[in-house]
Amino acid sequence: MKNTKKILASVLAIAISMAAIFTGCSTSTATSSAAQSKAEASKAASSAAASSAAWIKADGASNIIVIITPSHSNPFFKTEADAAEAKAKELGYQTLVLVHDDDPTKQSELFDTAISKKAAAIICDNAGADATVAAVKKARDAGIPTFLIDREINETGVAISQIVANNYQGAKLGAEKFVEAMGEKGNYVELTGKESDTNAGVRSKGYHEVMDQYPDMKMVAQQTANWEQTEAYSKMESIIQANKDIKGVICGNDTMAMGAAAAVKAAGLKNVVIVGLDGSNDVRDAIKAGDIVATSMQPAYDIAQMAAVQADQYIKTGKTGADEKQLVDCVLITKDNAGKLNNFALTK
């Protein structure tokens, strides 16, 4: 019996000792975990503060330029964003690049983001000539200047600069080549851009200023494909079913021209004259391959960099030294000079 009592006492002593050990380990782990979490939170806060500080100059002025464009899935808009960002950084600014997807509501929210960050300036390829006016006014009222590229808005005196390609001039260049390649006669199709975009109407008007002078050229279909390649392909499929004798397709931009070219090839049509407008690398390659005849290059890279330079000058002096509305001429691209085209710019 005594032995039994001794054994029970030993077991109890061991149990108490083990409990103390585990309790100690648990307390140590919890303390360590709490300290680690606190350190991580402190590090995150410091990082956020450093990031915010990078947007403020030594004199307390903002050092961020916000760049807002349509989706970068279109190489034209990606080139704009890249060019503006590169020039802004070269001039010593931080940048924030955002995408509105041609949605005016989303664009308005992105302007709110720029305002909340007290941006020094906004560079924007806008989501609608009418719908964008309120957003630009909102930024202006917050003391933030806006520099518009590629697309104008239907009001002056709101943005500081509106720098756009001369779409009318570029369209006429393309139409002249289109008429020449068609031999001044035959049935053709026109694919137009997004109706809310001023450029769509300007380009179509420029095309018809030239083409309507030739009575033997007949437009058998005119439809919008909203600047989109897949939509252009779909629209052309339907148009071709009703018009097997199409001799040409003139498109409001290069993306639609690529869709039209693919539909024409899929339908087995030969020697169809296709012309676009923008100056993308895809169309450059299609011109070199003989699938597309020509495009008018918008100098998107140069325009975006102009906007960054003017923003910098305005931030520093309150002036740009240029008119609000600025037109930059397009360049006709054919097989003769397609090899010099890269990212909406011509190499020397």
Image: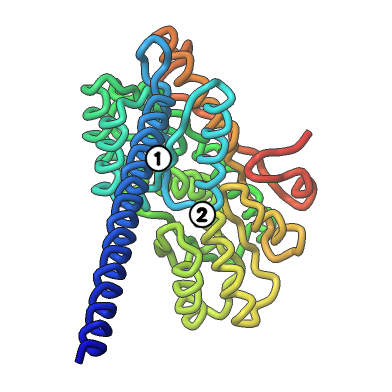
Towards the viewer: 340 or 260 = 340
**Which residue, given by chain and number where applicable, does mark 1 sit on?**
68
Picture residue at 24% right of the left edge, 70% below the top? 16
Q: Give coordinates of residue 270: x percent, y percent.
A: 69, 76
Query: Crowding near pointer 2: few (<14 within 10 Å), some, many (20+)?
Result: some
> Residue 269: which quarter of the image?
bottom right
Quadrant housing the C terminus: top right
- The chosen color scheme is rainbow
Q: CA distance from mark 2 to mark 1?
A: 14 Å
Under mark 1, the amino acid is Ile
Q: Is residue 64 above or below residue 31?
A: above
Q: Is residue 127 above or below residue 147?
A: below
> Of callouts 2 and 1, which one flags the residue occurring earlier in the amino acid sequence?
1
Towards the viewer: 6 or 216 = 6
**Which residue, given by chain and number where applicable, does mark 2 sit on?**
74
Q: Is residue 82 above or below residue 316?
A: below
Left or right: where 286 falls relative to 174 = right
